[in-house]
Image (cartoon, rainbow, N blue to C red):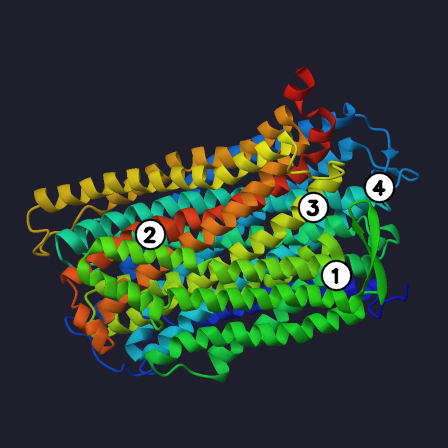
Amino acid sequence: MAGQILSEKGTQIIIPVCAVIGIAFSLLQWIVVSFVKLSPDKSSDGKKEPLIEEEEGGNDRSVIIRCADIQNAISEGATSFLFTEYQYVGVFMVSFAILIFLFLGSVEGFSTKNRPCTYDTSRMCKPALATAVFSTISFLLGAVTSVVSGFLGMKIATYANARTTLEARKGVGKAFILAFRSGAVMGFLLAANGLLVLYAAINLFKLFYGDDWEGLFESITGYGLGGSSMALFGRVGGGIYTKAADVGADLVGKVERNIPEDDPRNPAVIADNVGDNVGDIAGMGSDLFGSYAESSCAALVVGSISSFGISHDFTAMCYPLLISSVGILVCLITTLFATDFFEVRNVNEIEPALKNQLIISTVMMTFGIAMISWIALPTTFTIFSFGQQKEVQNWQLFLCVCVGLLSGLLIGFVTEYYTSNAYSPVQDVADACRTGAATNVIFGLALGYKSAIVPIFAITFSIFVSFSFAAMYGIAVAALGMLSTIATGLAIDAYGPISDNAGGIAEMAGMSHRIRERTDALDAAGNTTAAIGKGFAIGSAALVSLALFGAFVSRAEIEVVDVLTPKVFIGLLVGAMLPYWFSAMTMKSVGSAALKMVEEVRRQFNTIPGLMEGTTKPDYATCVKISTDASIKEMIPPGALVMLTPLIVGIFFGVETLSGVLAGALVSGVQIAISASNTGGAWDNAKKYIEAGVSEHARSLGPKGSDAHKAAVIGDTIGDPLKDTSGPSLNILIKLMAVESLVFAPFFATHGGLLFKIF
C-alpha cells in the first residue's frame, strides 16, 4: 500500500484553516450587506447611489422607516418562535442524551473494563461505557450546532430582507446581489461551523481513545444523530408555522377578498413572512447540516474499520473532511461569480445566474476532488465490505465522489425543469387552470410523480457505481460529493425566502408596483432554487441513508438481510408505510392550523371597521400566536413517530426486522419526498406565471383575480404543505431513522428482539 503525499500535520492544518476561511468569508459578506442602512439619518449623506425611481406615495425617508418597522416585526416574531421551539427541543435533547447513555452503557452492564474489538478480536478496545459517554457528548454537539446553524440563518435572513427591498429601487441586479450575499452568509457559516466542530470533536475524542479508532468513530456517529434530531423538529415545526400562515393568508386574502399577496390589510401577512424565515431558512439550514453531518459520520465509521483505521492513517481517515474543506474554497470562488465578477442586469438573467452557480461549483469541485484524492489517499487501500476487506484504488474513490457530485447536478437540473415556469411542465399546469382548480390539481400531481423518474435513476446509478468501486464507503463519499458544494447550495436556497420576504415588505410598505415586479421576479427564481435545494437534500439523504444502513447491518452483526424471511418482510412493509403516516400527520397539522388561521382572518375582516379600506391596522399578533401555538403542539407527534420507531422495533422485534423497516422507509420515502416537493413547487410557480404575465400565453390566463388565477392559488395552497412541510421533512425521516439505528445498534444486538425471545 503506497503512502499518500499529504502528511498528518498538513491535514491538521488544512481542515481548520479552510473552516476559518469559510467563517471569515461569511462575516465579510454580512458586513457588506450591512452597508445598506435602514436608518434614514445615517444614509442621507449625499453619497448614496441614485435610485432608478422615487417611490409613489412617500419620500425616501418614509419608505425606509416603513421597511425598518416591518423588518423589526418579522425579526421579533421569528426570534420569539425559535426561542419557544428551542425550549421544547431542549427538553427533548437532554432526555434523549440520557437515553443514549443508559442504553449504550447497559450493553456491558456499565463495565469500565476494556473489551475485545468488534472487528478485530485480537485487539482490546475501550469499554461500552466510553462509547455511551462520548456518543452522548457528540449527540449534544451535533444538536447544538444544528440549532445554532438554523438560528444564525434566520438572523441574517431577517437582517437582509428589508435591505433587499430597498436595493430593488436601484434595479433588480442590486437586489439580487444583496439577497445572494445574505444567503452566502448562512451557507458558509453552516458549512464551516459543521466542519470545524466535527474536526475538533474527533481530535478531542482521540485524546481518550488513542489507537481505538473503531470506538472513536462509532462515538462520532452521535454527531449526525444530534444534527438530524434538531433538523426534524425545525423542519416540521417551522413548516407547520409557515404553511398555516401562508394558506390562511392566501385563501381569505387572495381568493375571497381579492386583495394582493402580502397586502398589509391581511392579518396573516406578518405571520406568513415570519414563517418563511423559521421554516424555509432555520428549518432548511438544520436539515442540510444534518445531511452533511450524517454523510461525514457514515464515511468515518465505515472507514474506521478499513485499512485507514487499522493502520491509523489519519490523513486518509479525514478524506471526507478534506472534501468538505476544499468544497468551502470552491464555493467561495463560485460565489464571487455571482456577486463580483458578473452583474445581473435584468430579470431574465436571474435564474441563469443561479444555475451557473451550480455548474461552476460542480466543475471546480471535480478538480478539487481529484487533487484531494491524489494527495490524501494511498494508491491502493482496503475498504471493509460485509466481513471482508475489498481492495480499492484512489482513482476509484475519486469516481465515487464525482458520481455523487454529478448526480446532484443532474437532480438539480431535472428539478428546475419540472418546477421553473420557464419550461413547459409548469406552463401546462398553469394552462390547466383554464378549466378550474380540479384540472390544475390533476396536472400538478401527474407532474410530481413524473418528476421522480430521472432523480431515482440518477440515485440508483450512483449507488451501483459507488458500491461496485468501494462498497458502502463509496456510497457514503458519493453522498458527501453531492453535499460538497453545500455552501453554494445553501446560498441559493436561502436566497429564495429572503427575496420572498423582500416582496412582502415592498407590498406592506406601499412601494410602487414596479418594485414589486422586481421582487416577484427574484422570488420566482427563488422558488425554483428552493426546489433544487430540496432535490439535493433528498438525493443525498437516499445515499447517506443507504451508507448508514450498511454500517448498521455490519455493527449489528447481521450476516445477510433476507427479504424472504418473515422478520425482514414485515419490517419492509411497515417501513414503506411510515412515510405515508408521517406525511398524513404533518399535512393534517398544517390543515388544522390553517383552519384556525382562516377563521381568525375572516373574523378580523368581518368585525374590524375600516380594515378593508386600509384605515385601520389588523391584529397581526393574534395570527402570529395561532401559528406559534399550532406548530409547537403539532410538531411533537410526527417527531415522536420518527424517533420512537427504531427504538420500539429494535427492542421488541430485533435488528433483522429493524433492517427491513429502514430499507422500506428509504425506498418509499425518497419517491414521496421528490414528488411532493416538485408538485408543490410547480403549483407555486404556475401561480406566479399567471401573475407575472410575461408572455402572451400567461396574459391570456390572467390577470390577478381571474378564474384561472383563483384556480392557480388553490393549487398553490394545496402544494404549500407538500413542498414546505411533508416533502422536505421526509428526507430527515429516512436519514434520522438510519443514524439512530446505527447509534443504538450495540444495544439492539445485545438486548433487542424481546418478543421473538419470549415466543
Occupied quadrant, residue 519:
bottom left
> Residue at coordinates 19% horizontally, 63% vertically from top-left?
434
Q: Which tag is nearer the camera, tag 2 or tag 3?
A: 3
Is the residue marked by circle 2 packed among few (<14), some (14-19), or many (20+) residues within 10 Å? Answer: many
Q: Which residue is denoted by mark 1 in the rendering?
A: 469
Question: Outermost residue, front direction?
Answer: 564
Is residue 191 visible in the rendered image? The answer is yes
Sequence-wise, the earlier of marks 4 and 3 is: 4
Sequence-wise, the earlier of marks 2 and 3 is: 3
> Residue at coordinates 57% horizontally, 52% vertically from top-left?
542
Horizontal arrangement in the rendering, residue 173 relative to residue 649 (left or right): left
Is residue 76 visible in the rendered image? The answer is no
Residue 635 or 686: which is nearer the viewer?
686
Q: Which residue is denoted by mark 3 in the rendering?
A: 550
Q: Which residue is denoted by mark 4 in the rendering?
A: 119
Quote the CA–CA distance across marks 2 and 4.
48 Å
Vertically, is 7 above or below 635? Answer: below
Horizontal arrangement in the rendering, residue 460 relative to residue 175 (left or right): right
Question: Outermost residue, right direction?
Answer: 122
Q: Secondary structure at mark 4?
A: loop
Horizontal arrangement in the rendering, residue 538 relative to residue 727 (left or right): right
Horizontal arrangement in the rendering, residue 726 relative to residue 485 (left or right): left
